[in-house]
């Protein structure tokens, strides 16, 4: 690793600290400072004064705000989100159970997004202003305008209940279970343990949710790729390559894409928030037991600590992801500055 | 940008917004038609919201028909024993005993016509009652009548096309879907536009200040905005709605927070670049006050980008609002809302009642796509740049 | 070395760009020959269509532009009739190009050596990667870049070195014709001098024909055998370098030469041509230079003159030297 790259990474890591602080404060403000009493929000109107008071005392909501804030921060730093109010287990344990499902869904969707988005975007850029370009652009706008859950329901209706090709809910069929949980991603675990029946089952459950989320995001990604490719294809080295007799295909997919890839990776990082937001809806639609599901379900259960913990976890997650993406960027681009 | 930007393209920029738009037809070709198409979709929807009370056939909350009437269905046929059909006067059925099936549109119709009737649980019971002479006439769904007459001897169709039909069917409570779509447009557009308005006001203000003042404040604000931007918007909105409680205004506020950073970023970026441009330097050296520079020189330049971002954000806000409703955190149940209809309708999909969710979904997509198309097209048209040399 | 054998014959070439403001004729009925083994300088103000002409010679005009008409005869081949695939094979192998900015003309995420081997192997697919690498090493050696820079990325090289890499790419397949488009503009004076020396050496060694596009008359004087002057998309004048510098016929050429800092003129004030080049979407009628011409006549505003061989080997596009009737086209004159 070059000294420049190392310096860049250190700077980037340091920049993550204020970001985490801001995100955590944001969550604190929403959950504790905004008008709206968590006790009332969770226990609903009509709860007795004693109920409210004991709820507040249990969570420390009766203390002054600055004290709450300090406790809140130290809790996050120690990665201690308290106990679930309905399950009597630490919230971190809950997160550990539900998070792998989200990771599996996110990775699979990202794969769909990247494959569909990059190729259709590059193709559209290569054939700029052709009917194919317009078709791809309109389609991508429509894809992105689809409510994720609606697309999910439509796919369920067609390929699930309609044609009966694919399961429409959960991660595995009833009765199936991984022999051994290694990563928590069932498809990966199945490969690692060589359990092909499990793999087939897990993969077939993954197809529709991943397609749903992946396709919607591919709408955005196609447009980003196209725009970046157009920028790159206008650059001198493409003309110079053409003057050396390189094929158009090579110019677009090797030289162009490799260069467009650097901004695309950054944008992919920025889209991560969208991916997670989409995952919440996808998980709800497909009864996929991930983090989004956890949040939504526990809102119904009025499990304030779990909801709070899960949201905080999301905050840490996005900070972490943006760090990883930036570091990746540093490795991808040989012209690393800073 | 038109007034303050001086460039060789001034001829192009001085023909006014509408003229420029119309001229765009030639410059942008296909893209122009796409944009206009998006605009026309929106125009249609906006007209729909304005004229909702006149356009909607029914009250969106009224249980007007039978549950789960499929699209286009609802009309009834009147059957009688062959050859025994009593003289039927449709305006006065009070003399007849009419059989209907429970929870079908015929039951509603009979009630509305003021007929004396008997209700039966199943279609078989109903037909048996007619054949046994228990009733003189029965209402059956128009679509079923020919089949029934063909398979049961001794029945004939007395009258057809009675009552009303529901072009897009009815929902699980027998509400008219067309009416709900039309009234729902009001809700959806209202929430999305309100939230985009909130976020644009806050985002633009902060962006102007941040870009103009620079320094420490700028850095802090930027970092804050970047953090909000990197957080999954829907989750933030969910958390806020949980805390604030449901309701139109609360949803609008929750959704608006998500989009403040996009306005902020665009405006701040614009301010930074405009600030560097010569004429601002010149104005400053002539001793113009910061506020004058801000309002006279910088603000007009950020408007085009703001318009574009606004349009794109409305599209996004519509989807977020629908998402909130879908997870059950949206608006109160008495407000007609596409997202709500979708979330309620999904459980009936398995039973084959596809029309409950199909149409609201199409509407959401249509409106969101309309705003996106418009935003994308506007960005080309409001920022004219000739092909560079 | 220099023969009268014509390598590239260009006839009535028209290149248009379809812009939103209208059709821009960047190259308007241009005809001339490039002789085998010569260095032909092409000069003119920025925006007069030099680069467009250079690209058109490789049939590399991209949207929104196109070659509207004209004939391109390269080494006896009619390039306008050549299928695109064949044309592509010609690029880089028989005609190659050196661009203005070597920094942006090299792929920033591709190693230097990969640029060269890729070029060799696209034209000679049977060459192994290893053989191509060996040839690349030999080539950069010859051009004065040490072999251990081969695995560098473009941004790690100096400007001069990058331009040498660009030359090595142009010479990788021993092209007959090298089009150098403002190849020295981005270099500083000392590097530029070295670069020109190198080009002179290579010219002998590789038996090159060079179309040297530049707006720097000094470079032309140093390197070119003949000079073509372009104005607003048209050829103004073409002659042997000494002939042109000593007896420029076209008023534009005269103005251009007077605008060059000249040591002999010491403190004489530098001439500044009045007016500015025309808008190529709607150029002035008649001779395009007439609004700026000190010798403008009545006919100049109405009718365009022809590019015509006024003296042996000296072509000029001006009413001062031709009667309306006795237009002789280049076609007849050069046969
Ligand atoms: N891609 C393009 N699209 C539109 N016009 C162009 C394009 N490239 C060049 N032109 C126009 O063609 C004319 C000639 O340009 P160019 O060949 O680059 O001139 P030069 O190399 O002599 O500076 C200029 O007026 C320029 O504006
Ligand atoms: Mg040029």
Image (cartoon, coloured by chain):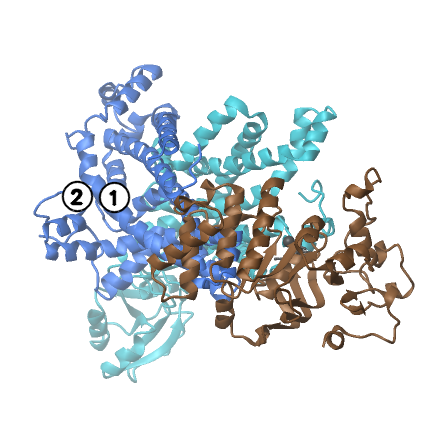
Chain colours: A blue, B cyan, C brown
- Label 1 and label 2 in one chain: yes
Taking depth in this image into account, of B269 and B197 the one nearest to the observer is B269
Q: Are marks 1 and 2 in contact (CB under 8 Å)?
A: yes
The residue at the point 38 percent across, 53 percent down is: A218
Tell me the CA gap for discs 1 and 2: 9 Å
The residue at the point 47 percent across, 48 percent down is: B315
Q: Position of residue B123 (x, y in %)?
A: 23, 70
Instruction: Give residue A184's mark.
Output: 2
Decide: few, some or many residues near mark 2? Use Cα within 10 Å; few <14, some 14-19, many ≥20: some
Q: Quadrant of residue B288?
A: top right
Taking depth in this image into account, of B183 and C261 the one nearest to the observer is C261
Q: Is residue B163 above or below residue A88?
A: below
Decide: few, some or many residues near mark 1? Use Cα within 10 Å; few <14, some 14-19, many ≥20: some
Taking depth in this image into account, of A121 and B225 the one nearest to the observer is A121
Q: Position of residue B94 (x, y in %)?
A: 36, 67
The residue at the point 31 percent across, 17 percent down is: A70
Ligand 1, seen in the image, is in the quarter at bottom right
The chain identifier of the residue carrying mark 1 reads A
Quadrant placement of the C terminus of chain C = bottom right
Toward the front, the furthest residue is: C1
* Disc 2 C-beta below 8 A from ligand 1: no
Check disc 1 and report its element: helix, strand or loop.
Answer: helix
* Residue A258 shows up from this direction: no
Question: Which residue lies under the disc numbered 1?
Answer: A103
Quadrant placement of the N terminus of chain C = bottom right
Q: Position of residue C266 (x, y in %)?
A: 81, 39
Q: Is residue C158 above or below residue B348?
A: above
Q: Position of residue C315 (x, y in %)?
A: 77, 66
Direction from residue B373 to residue C220 in the image, left or right: right
* Residue B149 shows up from this direction: yes
């Amino acid at each position: 690793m070059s000294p420049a790259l190392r310096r860049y990474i250190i700077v980037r890591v340091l920049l993550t600290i204020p970001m985490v602080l801001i995100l955590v404060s944001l969550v604190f403000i929403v959950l504790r400072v905004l008008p709206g009493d968590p006790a009332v929000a969770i226990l609903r109107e009509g709860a007795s004064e004693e109920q409210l008071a004991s709820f507040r005392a249990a969570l420390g909501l009766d203390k002054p705000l600055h004290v709450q804030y300090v406790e809140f921060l130290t809790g996050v730093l120690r990665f201690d989100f308290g106990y679930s109010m309905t399950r009597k287990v630490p919230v971190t344990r809950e997160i550990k159970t539900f998070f792998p499902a989200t990771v599996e869904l996110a990775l699979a969707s990202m794969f769909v997004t990247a494959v569909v988005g990059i190729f259709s975007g590059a193709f559209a850029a290569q054939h700029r202003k052709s009917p194919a370009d317009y078709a791809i652009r309109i389609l991508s706008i429509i894809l992105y305008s689809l409510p994720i859950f609606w697309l999910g329901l439509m796919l369920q209706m067609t390929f699930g209940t309609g044609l009966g090709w694919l399961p429409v809910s959960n991660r595995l069929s009833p009765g199936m279970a991984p022999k051994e949980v290694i990563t928590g991603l069932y498809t990966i675990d199945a490969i690692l343990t060589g359990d092909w029946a499990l793999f087939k089952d897990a993969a077939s459950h993954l197809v529709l949710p991943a397609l749903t989320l992946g396709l919607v995001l591919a709408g955005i990604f196609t447009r980003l790729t196209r725009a970046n490719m157009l920028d790159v294809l206008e650059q001198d080295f493409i003309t110079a390559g053409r003057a050396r007799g390189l094929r158009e295909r090579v110019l677009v997919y090797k030289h162009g894409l490799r260069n467009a890839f650097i901004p695309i990776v950054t944008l992919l990082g920025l889209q991560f928030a969208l991916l997670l937001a989409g995952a919440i809806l996808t998980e709800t639609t497909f009864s996929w037991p991930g983090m989004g599901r956890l949040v939504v379900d526990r809102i119904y259960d009025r499990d304030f600590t779990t909801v709070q913990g899960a949201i905080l976890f999301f905050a840490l997650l996005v900070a972490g992801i943006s760090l990883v993406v930036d570091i990746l960027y540093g490795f991808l681009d040989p012209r690393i500055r800073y | 940008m038109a007034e303050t930007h001086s460039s060789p393209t001034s001829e192009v920029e001085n023909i006014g917004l509408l003229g420029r738009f119309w001229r765009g037809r030639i410059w942008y070709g296909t893209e122009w038609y796409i944009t206009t198409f998006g605009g026309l979709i929106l125009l249609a929807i906006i007209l729909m919201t304005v004229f909702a009370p006149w356009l909607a056939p029914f009250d969106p909350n009224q249980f007007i028909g039978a549950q789960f009437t499929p699209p286009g269905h609802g009309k009834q046929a009147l059957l009688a024993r062959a050859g025994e059909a009593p003289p039927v006067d449709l305006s006065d059925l009070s003399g007849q005993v009419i059989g209907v099936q429970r929870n079908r549109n015929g039951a509603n119709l009979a009630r509305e016509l003021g007929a004396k009737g008997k209700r039966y649980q199943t279609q078989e019971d109903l037909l048996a009652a007619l054949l046994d002479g228990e009733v003189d006439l029965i209402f059956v769904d128009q679509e079923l009548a020919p089949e029934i007459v063909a398979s049961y001897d001794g029945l004939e169709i007395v009258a057809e096309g009675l009552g009303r039909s529901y072009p897009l069917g009815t929902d699980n409570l027998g509400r008219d879907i067309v009416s709900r779509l039309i009234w729902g447009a009001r809700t959806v557009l209202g929430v999305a536009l309100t939230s985009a308005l909130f976020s644009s006001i806050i985002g633009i203000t902060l962006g102007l200040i941040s870009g103009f003042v620079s320094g420490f404040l700028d850095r802090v604000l930027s970092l804050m905005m970047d953090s909000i931007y990197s957080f999954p918007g829907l989750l933030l909105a969910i958390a806020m709605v949980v805390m604030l409680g449901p309701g139109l205004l609360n949803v609008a506020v929750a959704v608006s927070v998500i989009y403040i950073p996009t306005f902020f970023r665009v405006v701040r970026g614009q301010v930074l670049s405009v600030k560097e441009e010569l004429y601002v330097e010149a104005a400053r050296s002539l001793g113009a006050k910061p506020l004058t520079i801000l309002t006279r020189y910088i603000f007009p330049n950020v408007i085009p980008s703001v318009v574009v971002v606004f349009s794109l954000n409305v599209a996004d806000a519509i989807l977020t609002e629908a998402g909130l409703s879908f997870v059950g955190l949206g608006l109160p149940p008495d407000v007609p809302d596409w997202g709500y209809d979708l979330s309620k309708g999904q459980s009936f999909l398995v039973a084959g009642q596809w029309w409950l969710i199909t149409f609201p979904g199409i509407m959401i997509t249509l409106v969101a796509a309309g705003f996106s198309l418009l935003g994308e097209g506007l960005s080309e048209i409001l920022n004219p740049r000739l092909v560079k040399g | 070395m220099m023969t009268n054998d014509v390598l590239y014959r260009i006839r009535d070439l028209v290149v248009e760009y379809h812009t939103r403001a209208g059709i821009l004729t960047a190259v308007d009925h241009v005809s001339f020959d490039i002789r085998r083994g010569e260095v032909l300088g092409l000069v003119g103000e920025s925006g007069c269509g030099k680069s467009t002409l250079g690209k058109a010679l490789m049939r590399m005009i991209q949207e929104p532009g196109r070659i509207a008409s004209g004939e391109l005869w390269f080494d006896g081949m009619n390039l306008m009739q050549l299928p695109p695939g064949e044309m592509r094979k010609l690029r880089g192998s028989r005609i190659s190009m050196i661009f203005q900015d070597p920094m942006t003309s090299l792929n920033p995420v591709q190693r230097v050596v990969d640029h060269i081997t890729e070029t060799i192997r696209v034209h000679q697919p049977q060459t192994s990667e290893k053989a191509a690498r060996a040839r690349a090493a030999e080539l950069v050696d010859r051009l004065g870049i040490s072999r251990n820079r081969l695995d560098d990325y473009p941004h790690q090289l100096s400007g001069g070195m990058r331009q040498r890499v660009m030359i090595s790419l142009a010479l990788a397949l021993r092209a007959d014709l090298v089009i150098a488009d403002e190849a020295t503009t981005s270099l500083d004076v000392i590097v530029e001098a070295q670069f020109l020396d190198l080009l002179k050496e290579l010219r002998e060694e590789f038996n090159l024909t060079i179309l040297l596009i530049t707006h720097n008359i000094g470079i032309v004087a140093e390197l070119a055998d003949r000079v073509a002057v372009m104005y607003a998309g048209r050829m103004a004048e073409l002659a042997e370098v000494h002939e042109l510098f000593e007896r420029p016929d076209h008023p534009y050429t005269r103005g251009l030469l007077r605008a060059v800092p000249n040591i002999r003129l010491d403190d004489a004030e530098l001439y500044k041509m009045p007016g500015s080049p025309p808008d190529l979407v709607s150029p002035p009628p008649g001779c395009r230079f007439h609004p700026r011409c000190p010798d403008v006549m009545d006919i100049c505003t109405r009718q365009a003159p022809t590019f015509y061989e006024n003296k042996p080997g000296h072509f000029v596009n001006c009413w001062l030297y031709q009667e309306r009737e006795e237009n002789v086209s280049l076609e007849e004159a050069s046969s």
